[in-house]
Amino acid sequence: MGFSASVGVQRFAFEDLRALLAKAGPARSGDALAGLAANSEAERMAARMVLADLPLRRFLDEAVIPYELDEVTRLILDSHDESAFAAISSLTVGQLREHLLCDETDTAALRRLASGITPEMAAAVSKLMRNQDLILVAAKCKVVTSFRNTLGLPGRLAVRLQPNHPTDDPKGVAASMLDGLMYGCGDAVIGINPASDNLPAIIAMLQLVDDFRTRYAVPTQSCVLTHVTNSLRAIDGGAPVDLVFQSIGGSEKTNESFGIDLALLREAQAAARSLGRGTAGENLMYFETGQGSALSANAHGGVDQQTLEVRAYAVARAFEPLLVNSVVGFIGPEYLYDGKQIIRAGLEDHFCGKLLGLPMGCDICYTNHAEADQDDMDNLLTLLGVAGVNFVMGVPGADDVMLNYQSTSFHDAAYLRRVLGKRCAPEFEAWLIDSGIADTDGKLLPPAPGQPLLQLAASL
């Protein structure tokens, strides 16, 4: 059954729920490229009017990708918590927006609600929200996870230290890692994107970080962001694997393009848990996502890129991850054209992920051919900090020399912590203080002669 609405003298028709969601979304290049976007602001407003009056139960009755064709749809519907949904089951999408913004809907209420909200409900309500609405609600969502330290606590902001090197040179990786640690970065994870899928090189990097972490008693976790099958091979080979990484998407076809399915992710999670390497908790999966991945794989099935992005969060939610990272501007201007679209997408992703109960971080980034610059990234960094993002990236100089894109630097993380009064993960902060990197208030100190990390850096 379709939908229709009038704006002025114009009447607009929407064939099905997929079309309605696509037309209601803010303008972005990816949806235009796929032929899904609204053709005018009047059509976009008509779609939002219809969407606001749509009962939430409609999303349980009509799947945007058929149940029998897609394991992500089956996961979403089969795992839906009807008891959690009961509190909002009589609401429309517009009424859900008002409910989420209400002062009485606090952190505890949002936590109880999370398993009752489907990705499509979250995507739909985000399309009716201004940026400040997305920030306000996300700031009320607190999601705490742990492995060797505790992430997501109130007043805390973690940083993924990203010491990539174009040839996986151990000294280059080590130099960037030490630089980041001296700036208080690395509590989310020391996470390396390998330049190749060479298994011996991957194992060598895992061993490098683990030897360093053990030697200096750093309470954090490491990860080499290789394909999940390589992580399984590394585990079989006795490598020190902390977190299992994988890029994921919001449809079965998208995940097939990544070479994965849900069964493979379950196998990897079980293998990593069997190592028993976590000391503070067992959250050990690390997922990355990004609007446009389904379209780039020709696997969108007529669904807009933001709705598909949020469906990927249903996959993540099933595996109790330590970290979920929206790499917001990485794919390029074909999907998010400029700074305005990147900022909006970053706020949407963070809001929707947190609403679904996920520990959301963001790689606040852009490619060099996008209509964006570092001022746009400063704006999104600050907005996400206010919204309570769990972690951001720490890249030397904000310029990743291996992946060739622009992200956020160690200095950017220090800025955000200072301006918002945020601190590191508590276990990591205690290590920074004991190591002479920070004072007892968590503020960074100048490098001191004789400091062990400084001596190690000088030896490289």
Image (cartoon, rainbow, N blue to C red):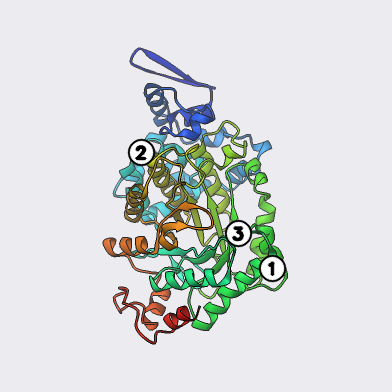
The local crowd at label 2, few if under 14, some if 14 to 19, many if 20 or more residues have their Cα within 10 Å, is some
Q: Are marks 1 and 3 in contact (CB under 8 Å)?
A: no
Q: Is residue 434 left or right of residue 325?
A: left
Identify residue for label 1: 200
Q: Nearer the viewer, mark 2 or mark 3?
A: 3
Rounded to the nearest angstrom, the CA distance separating label 1 from label 3 is 12 Å
Q: Nearer the viewer, mark 2 or mark 1?
A: 1
Seen in the picture, residue 216 relative to 131 is either above or below; the reply is: below
Labels 2 and 1: the sequence-earlier one: 2
Nearest to the observer: residue 438 or residue 406 = 406
Nearest to the observer: residue 105 or residue 307 = 307
Nearest to the observer: residue 259 or residue 321 = 259
Q: Is residue 58 visible?
A: yes
Residue 424 horizontal/vertical position (percent)? 38, 69
Q: Is residue 394 left or right of residue 296?
A: left
Identify residue for label 3: 195
Residue 24 horizontal/vertical position (percent)? 43, 30
Label at residue 457: none
Identify residue for label 2: 129
Q: Which amino acid type corresponds to the residue marked 2 in the rendered image?
A: Met
